[in-house]
Image: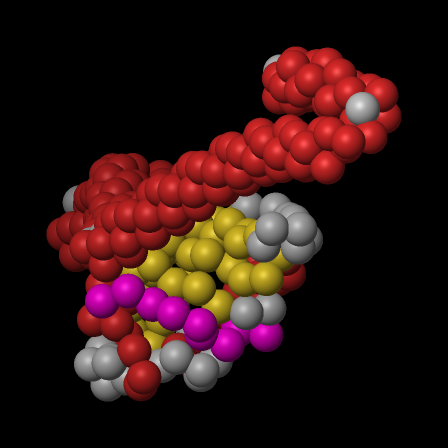
Amino acid sequence: MESRHLRDSWAIVAVPVAVAGAWALAAPAAGIYGLALCASILAAWALLRSGGLSRRLREAEAALAREVAERGEIERTLADQKQRLKMVIESEPECVKIHAADGTILDMNPAGLAIIEAKRREDIVGKSAYGYIAPEWRAKYAEMTERVFRGETATLEFRLIARSGMERWMKTHAVPLRDRDGSIWALLGFTRNITDRRNAEEHERQHRIAVARLLRMHSMGEMATTIAHELNQPLTAIINYSRGAIRRLRSAQGSIDEVIDSLEAASSEADRAA
């Protein structure tokens, strides 16, 4: 549209310029006036052309201003989103931590600081997370970290040792953090204190063990009662047969065969009890 406007402007001044030039050639006496007229017309054309350039320049400046405004709006939106994300992380009741592949802590929210019993970020940032993990769980935690830096998500329950030495059970859900080119630069972990749950589970386990022990003791008691009952009958018979044989021997009233029969019966009951 702009080039068509310039072509139209040139067409408007082209005819007078041609007429003035012809007049200057045809009338030498008036040549100087013709040249002056040509110069005036060319100056007018130059003004028209410079006006078109100025308009294009103004349009370019306006487009640049719009682009700058749009970029500024995007930057403000990103800043607002970053601020809201920071507020969410700061107010999160569970531990949110970021650490490098070697376990170096890069950041942690106030909830995480409270779990470790640190007062300031400076107390833990730059230090290794493995210093707060129970020794028997460090290999498992390192394995989880390697998985995350391979691009996986992972979950792990482990024991944590706070700065005071108090032990707590933790459950962490870890995901990889990527930069613009997709490279993983950190681990983002959401960690929950599950000490109460693990203590309840341990209490329940101990309760089940105690109940099983009581059941075994009850079963043993029932078995002992059954055995005692089964033994009581032959033992009672042995006692009765033995006492009968003794009475016959002392009173000399019974025959020797009766005494022998009583002793044989007692021996039979003893075999049964055995």
Residue 161's place in the image compared with 261, above or below, is below
* Residue 25 to residue 203: above or below: above
Q: Residue at x 59, y 62 (%)?
A: 185
| Rendering coords of residue 37 (x, y %) | 66, 30
Q: From the viewer's perspective, is 164 left or right of 266?
A: left
Most foreground residue, 124 or 211: 124
Q: Residue at x 65, y 49 (%)?
A: 182
Residue 248 can be seen, yes or no: no
Task: Where is residue 31? Give x, y as percent.
Answer: 77, 32
Residue sitting nearer the eye, 138 or 200: 138
**What's drawn in magenta, residue-wise?**
102-110
Q: How many marks?
A: 0
- Residue 132 appears left or right of 63: left
**Residue 35 position in % (x across, y down):** 73, 35
Seen as rendered, the residue at the extreme front is 29
Q: Which residue is most to the right?
A: 25
Q: How is the image coloured?
A: secondary structure
Q: Quadrant of the N terminus?
A: top right
Question: What is the quadrant of residue 90 in the picture?
Answer: bottom left
- Magenta stretch: includes residue 105: yes
Identify the residue shown where x is 44% and y is 64%: 98
Q: Position of residue 11 (x, y in %)?
A: 70, 14
At horizontal 73% and vertical 22% (from top left) the residue drawn is 20
User: In the picture provided, is 185 more to the left or to the right than 15?
Assistant: left
User: Vertically, is 129 above or below 32?
Assistant: below
* Residue 247 is at least partly visible in this image: yes
